[in-house]
Image (spheres, rainbow, N blue to C red):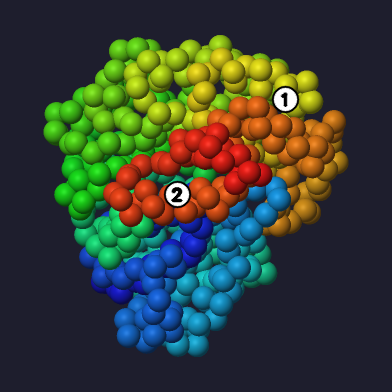
């Protein structure tokens, strides 16, 4: 039976850029293909009160997407889920119907957030199959308790079913990205996004990604990816971000995807996350010909002993070689570092800084402390070291900092690195950078703008202090 479903993206986080809610688009696609009618509310752009939308649309179900839990910044610790209870309360008051939670952030804390929101159900993991299955079962009055990924109540207990698995063989359509939503992200933040695969075979100690979507990479057909890029181009996108945890999960995947893009004749430029290992000059050349313009490397450290402690299974030599390939190809690139995790010391920080001088002034985005999420190897380590207990509520952000280090001293050291090398970026962007971003966007500049920050630090160092 067809139903009306109101889909709500509660994400309000816009730094450094607001991100189009791609996960909600995939769920929207599955619901539409199952014959349901959908309507979106995006808290980044909608000014109409939720109560008014509920009264006007009169949905049979409300789906709420929780993309982020917090900002992953040790000094700010801003959380992104505080309004969940108010949403459920408004639904109960204006248009009583089941409230169903989902999204990447929700899937990290499915029991706690269901309890906090007083919602009816949740879906942990991918919702493309489970959400329509739940709606169908509820409409028929059937038992729902065996649906993969379903989070539901059994008496006083909250039960979390094993997560579902999705292969992404169905392409999105333009209608799956509501025009008013897509246009906002194009106008204000210059880009939309696409996903070529899910899953991650690596074991970085802090990462929740394998817990959410598995350790096995499930790759989408290359022609579907190329078709979705063509759709985005037709919607006006000049720049697209590939949101895979690691785009270069295998050389074959990269090659087949890029060749499909070239065959389709798509001209949009794009960026992606790459693992700084296993790249070759021919593969880099192919990516550039297919539109690659920017790379964000998840390096996390430039010191081999710390890389080993982080579970990265790569070396600084891998990072250096990958950087050189990007530089030689004319692609802008940056490295993300997590400073202060397991194995970090003042000496390893200095090693990372010295090694960074070999990276041809690549932009380096450094944060302090490693966010602890349940179920990760870091969580297990923090338990063993007595930093947390199994009863610690990690919805309140908690961070791991190596025993020898303190937060203030580590920040001070990174600030010294930044003073010596303006390509090191630590902390929130200053007002000067924010103003520059606004000017560049108004002039039609697209894509990531982190490459401009070192220029500001060189020209106006006092603006970033």
What is the secondary structure assignment of the residue under circle 2? helix
Q: Is residue 148 above or below residue 165?
A: below
Q: Residues within 10 Å of mark 2 (few under 14, many from 20)?
A: some
What is the secondary structure assignment of the residue under circle 1? helix
User: Which residue is under mark 1?
Assistant: 349
Q: Earlier in the sequence, mark 2 or mark 1?
A: 1
Pick the front one: 247 or 330:
330
Mark-to-mark CA distance, 2 and 1: 31 Å
Q: Is residue 7 above or below residue 148?
A: below
User: Which residue is under mark 2?
Assistant: 436
Which residue is located at x 24 percent, y 28 percent? 290
| 260 sits to left or right of 272 | left
Q: Residues within 10 Å of mark 1 (few under 14, many from 20)?
A: many
Can I make out residue 323 in this image?
Answer: yes
Q: Is residue 232 above or below residue 290?
A: below
The image position of residue 423, as x and y in percent, is: 55, 30
The image position of residue 257, as x and y in percent, is: 27, 29
Which residue is located at x 73 percent, y 39 percent? 411
Can I make out residue 159 in this image?
Answer: no
The image position of residue 80, as x and y in percent, is: 57, 61
Q: Say the numbered circle drawn on residue 139.
A: none
- The answer to whether the residues at label 2 and label 1 have Cβ atoms under 8 Å apart is no
The image position of residue 254, as x and y in percent, is: 32, 25
Give the quadrant of residue 341: top right
In which quadrant is the C terminus drawn?
Answer: top right
């Amino acid at each position: 039976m067809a139903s009306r479903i109101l889909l709500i993206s509660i994400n309000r986080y816009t730094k450094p850029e607001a991100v189009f809610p791609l996960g909600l688009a995939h769920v929207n696609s599955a619901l539409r293909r199952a014959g349901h009618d959908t309507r979106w509310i995006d808290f980044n752009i909608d000014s109409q009160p939720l109560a008014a939308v509920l009264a006007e649309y009169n949905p049979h179900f409300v789906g709420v997407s929780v993309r982020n839990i917090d900002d992953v910044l040790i000094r700010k610790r801003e959380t992104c889920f505080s309004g969940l209870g108010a949403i459920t309360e408004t639904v109960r008051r204006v248009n009583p119907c089941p409230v169903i939670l989902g999204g990447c952030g929700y899937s990290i804390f499915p029991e706690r957030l269901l309890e906090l929101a007083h919602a009816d159900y949740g879906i942990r993991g991918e919702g493309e199959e489970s959400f329509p299955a739940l709606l169908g079962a509820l409409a028929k009055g059937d038992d729902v308790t065996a649906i993969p990924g379903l989070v539901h109540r059994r008496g006083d207990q909250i039960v979390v079913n094993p997560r579902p698995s999705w292969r992404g063989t169905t392409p999105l359509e333009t209608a799956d990205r509501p025009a008013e939503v897509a246009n906002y992200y194009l106008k204000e933040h210059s880009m939309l996004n696409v996903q070529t695969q899910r899953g991650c075979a690596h074991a970085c100690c802090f990462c929740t990604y394998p817990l959410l979507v598995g350790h096995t990479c499930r790759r989408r057909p290359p022609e579907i990816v190329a078709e979705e890029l063509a759709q985005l181009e037709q919607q006006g996108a000049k720049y697209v971000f590939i949101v895979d945890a690691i785009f270069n999960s295998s050389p074959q995947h990269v090659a087949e995807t890029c060749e499909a893009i070239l065959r389709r004749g798509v001209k949009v430029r794009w960026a992606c996350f790459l693992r700084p290992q296993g790249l070759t000059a021919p593969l880099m050349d192919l990516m550039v010909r297919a539109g690659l313009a920017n790379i964000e490397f998840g390096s996390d450290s430039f010191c081999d002993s710390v890389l080993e402690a982080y579970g990265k299974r790569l070396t600084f030599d891998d990072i250096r070689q990958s950087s050189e390939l990007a530089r030689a190809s004319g692609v802008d690139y940056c490295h993300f570092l997590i400073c202060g995790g397991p194995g970090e010391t003042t000496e390893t920080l200095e090693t990372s800084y010295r090694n960074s001088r070999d990276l041809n002034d690549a932009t380096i985005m450094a944060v302090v402390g490693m966010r602890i999420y349940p179920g990760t190897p870091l969580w297990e380590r923090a338990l063993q070291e007595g930093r947390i207990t199994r009863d610690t509520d990690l919805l309140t952000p908690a961070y791991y900092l190596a025993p020898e280090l303190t937060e203030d001293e580590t920040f001070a050291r990174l600030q010294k690195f930044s003073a010596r090398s303006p390509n090191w970026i630590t902390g929130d962007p200053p007002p000067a950078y924010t103003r520059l971003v606004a000017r560049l966007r108004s002039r039609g500049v697209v894509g990531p703008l982190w490459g401009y920050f070192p220029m500001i630090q060189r020209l106006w160092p006092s603006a970033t202090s």
